Amino acid sequence: MTPSAISKRVVADRLDLIDSFLREIRSLPLEKPSGFFADRRNIWSAESCLRRSLEALFDVGRHILAKGFGSGVSEYKEISLRLQEKAVLTETEAKLLTVLAGYRNRLVHFYHEVSAQELFEICSRQLGDLELIENAYRRWMKDHPEKVDSSL
């Protein structure tokens, strides 16, 4: 795979999607479990928005690796390792992204094991983890304009 320019538009679109999904999650009644569990639709909304946020986060990482470095990856956990190797993410950020990859895999493949209580805990306390990785991507893009195609 030959490196080329990273599409600023692709990255921005995915990051905007993540922000939109996180806003949707935060609009749910997350103050107390009783409010969250009062309407089962909150659980399904939270799960869908969280899963889609994670997918978009990994899409951005995969795009940066493929376009910016000519590096293809097939495993979600591999994305974080390659992003660290290429100094897109710090070691701490890469470890966090690896944890998020594991959670994404649970939501997709072991969805039947993810409890409503677990979803509530994550949505009420850990959404900042996704934003931390988002900000790392933004920081790297800003610091490496030579790798970015800013055209529409």
Image: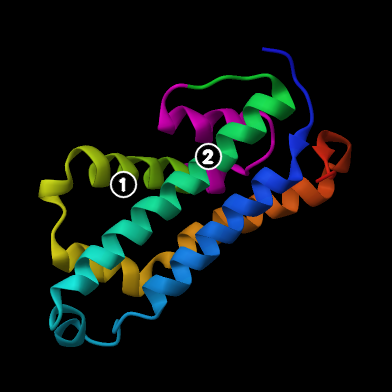
Q: Which image quadrant is residue 72 in?
A: top right
Q: Tell me what residue is drawn at x 53 percent, y 39 percent.
A: 59
Q: Is residue 71 left or right of residue 29?
A: right
Q: Residue furthest front?
A: 152
In the displayed structure, 37 sits above or below 108; it is below
Q: Position of residue 100 (x, y in %)?
A: 39, 47
Residue 93: x and y in percent read 55, 48
Residue 96: where, in percent of width, then height?
46, 48
Marks 2/1 in contact by CB < 8 Å: the verdict is no
**Amino acid under disc 1:** Tyr
Q: Nearer the viewer, mark 2 or mark 1?
A: 2
Q: Which of the two discs, 2 and 1, labels the residue nearer the N terminus?
A: 2
Which residue is tagged 1? 103
Which stretch appears magenta? 74-95
What secondary structure is found at the residue carrying circle 2? helix
Check residue 88 for magenta coloring: yes
Q: Residue at x 41, y 25 (%)?
A: 75
The amino acid on which the numbered mark 2 sits, given as a three-letter code, is: Asp
Q: Please rate how many residues cluster around mark 1, counting C-alpha atoms within 10 Å: few if below 14, some from 14 to 19, many from 20.
A: some
Q: Is residue 148 magenta?
A: no
Examine the rendered structure and indicate whether residue 19 appears above or below residue 133.
below
